[in-house]
Amino acid sequence: MVSIDWGMFWEIVNFFILLFLLIKYLYGPITEALEKRKNKIENTLTEADKKREEAEDLKQKYENELANARQEAQAIINKARQQGEEEKKDIIKEANEEANRKLKRAEEEIVRAKKQAVSELRDEVASVSILIAQKLIEKSIDQQAQQQIVSEYIDKLDGEKIGEAKC
């Protein structure tokens, strides 16, 4: 017959009771704590991934904005440079036009002065000629005759020397 060792039996019973108590009171809370920790770690990792993606998105956004700002700055610089060149051309054009106007005015003044000098010279020559003619003729002539003599003399001079002067 098989004899039952009651000490061993009670040890097995105690083992199962201890196992039951450990499973009921210790395994559940430990498993629950491990599950919570696992979930917390997963949540932290998920949150870290989201934060990293957000940071990368922000970095990309700021890099794009920086590139756009650089392009806008370059466009502004180019526009300012172009406006400066246009203003430079306008100023040079205006200066050339003003110089041409002054040159034309000076030329016109020279022509006018030349004509005036020729006219004054004619008048002077006519006056001197009349005086000489009066002294030579030694007679007094009336105003109408004097005017006729002056005109004839001027016409004669126009045909000779004074007419050759360029105005």
Image (cartoon, grey):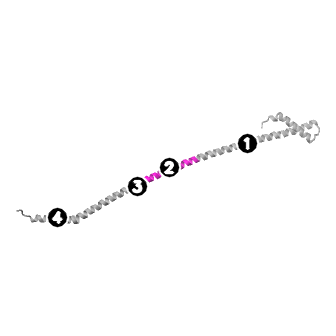
- Residue 85: image location, x then y, percent: 59, 45
Residue indicated by mark 1: 106
Looking at the image, do the residues carrying marks 4 and 3 touch, with CB atoms under 8 Å apart? no
- In three-dimensional space, the C-alpha distance between marks 2 and 3, rounded to whole angstroms, equals 24 Å
Callout 2 secondary element: helix
Front: mark 2 or 4:
4
Among numbered discs 4 and 3, the one appearing first in the sequence: 4
> Label 3 is placed on what type of residue?
Ala
> Label 4 is placed on what type of residue?
Phe
Residue indicated by mark 3: 55
Front: mark 4 or 1:
4
Q: Which secondary structure is most common in the magenta stretch?
A: helix
Give the numbered dot on residue 16. Answer: 4
Count of numbered circles on the image: 4
Q: Which residues are magenta?
A: 56-83
Quarter location, residue 19: bottom left
Quarter location, residue 129: top right
For this orientation, the residue located farthest to the front is 1
Among numbered discs 4 and 1, the one appearing first in the sequence: 4
- Residue 80: image location, x then y, percent: 56, 49
> Label 1 is placed on what type of residue?
Ala
Among numbered discs 2 and 3, the one appearing first in the sequence: 3
Neighbours of disc 3 within 10 Å: few (<14), some (14-19), many (20+): few
Callout 3 secondary element: helix
Residue indicated by mark 2: 71
